Amino acid sequence: MTLQSKYFRFLTCLILMLAADYLQGQETVNPPAVINASGIWLKGELHVHSRHSTESSNNSISKIINFSKSVGMDLVCITDHDNHVNGDVAHHTWADPEFKSDSLLLLYGAEWTTTRGHGNVFSDKPYNHQRLYDIRDARDVNIGKVKESLGIHLSANHPSGKDNFGFSYDLVESIEIWNSAIWSKNANAIMIWDDMLSSGRMMTGRGGSDAHHGVPTAAEKPGANTYQAEYNYVGTPTTWVFAKQRSLKAIIDALDHGTVAVSSNPFAPRVEFYADYHGNGKFEMMMGDNAVSTGKPVKFQVQLMGNKLTNEQYTITVIKNGAKLDSFKVSGKIPAIQFTDTPDLKGRTYYRVTVEGKNTDYPQVPKSASLSGKMVAISNPIYFNFDPKF
Ligand SMILES: [Zn+2]
Ligand SMILES: [Zn+2]
């Protein structure tokens, strides 16, 4: 055999090996395995400011509610700056006659706006926000006791931006991994989230537009920041919550647990992420779930639901313990993939996925899609060997 033909055979071999590897990585499933989880996907906005935040403009509560309904939102939490009303959210945002809806689920909350950073409170019922405001400059251990007694869900806001959450992450159940339509500024928030997950915290990732400015009605005057409403408003991004039922209590439970995914806008696809723990084809684990590792391989399924751009290809990237495990290209009616990996028998392992591709247009916030770049959706993690009592 000449050197040339040896080289040729070597090359052919290499190409075949690479192709086999490539094909193995492309385990698309069509249709994907059917998931039998009982509950309902609800889409929402978890960080928006109304006229009770003094720097907002043209953003009455009724405007936020009507807009949210018009784009098919199920839930909204209006999170006004508590320091603008000296902590008395109960007599401002919640007492506003417009704070009611026949169809939209309105969580009780506020943005805890402190010298050491910002956090959002989410609650299914009114609570004594004044107590949390009054203790804002105390030591974390004392804040923790008050927070505990109020029975609220606390969430770290814009963790890598200005006014980042400078308190202990032991105080929070969730973290804002996607703040506003401007995706690029969230990269470090994701890094912080991965660090917190790696440290053993099961911490829900969620989104929030942090919008302050609405589109003026005929009777209202535009302001210096009115232009922002075209770039960033309710739903940029959208947080999807898989709740046991359509109730405020079930939404808080889901936020606590992590059955949550974030999409760039209300019309972008939603990512769902499951694992077949028992190896029986049933995919009984979903985002937020935690199980003891058996040391055996586990099959995972990722699927894109809701609106898809059927002619577009999406890239699904799997993150394992903060590092990329694999990525897959998907397209079609229900873009889905399955992959297999073995969670560590002794140590902790978590998996989460991101979806990139062409962003779906959001005509009501026409300039938002370009700001979101290629980021379409992010899942919450599936956990193995995490300590639920951590
Ligand atoms: Zn803030
Ligand atoms: Zn805010």
Image: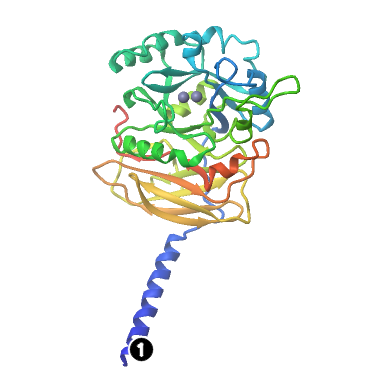
Which quadrant would residue 305 be assigned to in this image? top right
- Is the residue 247 above or below the residue 361 in the image? above
- Is the residue 315 above or below the residue 289 in the image? below
The residue positioned farthest toward the bottom in the image shown = 1
The residue positioned farthest toward the left in the image shown = 346
Q: Residue type at mark 1: give it.
A: Ser
Q: Which quarter of the rendering shows the N terminus?
A: bottom left
Which residue is more in the foreground, 139 or 307?
139
- Left or right: where 211 falls relative to 147: right
Q: Which quarter of the rendering shows the C terminus?
A: top left
- Whole-percent x, y for residue 280 in the image: 42, 49
- Whole-percent x, y for residue 132 in the image: 40, 12
- Left or right: where 64 falls relative to 27: right
Which residue is more in the foreground, 201 or 250?
201
Which element carries disc 1, helix, strand or loop? helix
Circle 1 residue = 5
- Is the residue 84 above or below the residue 342 in the image? above
Residue 366 visible: yes
The residue positioned farthest toward the right in the image shown = 218
- Left or right: where 345 falls relative to 54: left
- Whole-percent x, y for residue 229 in the image: 62, 31
Q: Name the residue rendered at 52%, 38% in the picture.
A: 182
How many C-alpha atoms fall within 10 Å of the one at disc 1: few (<14), some, or many (≥20)?
few
- Whole-percent x, y for residue 378 in the image: 48, 42
Residue 269 visible: no
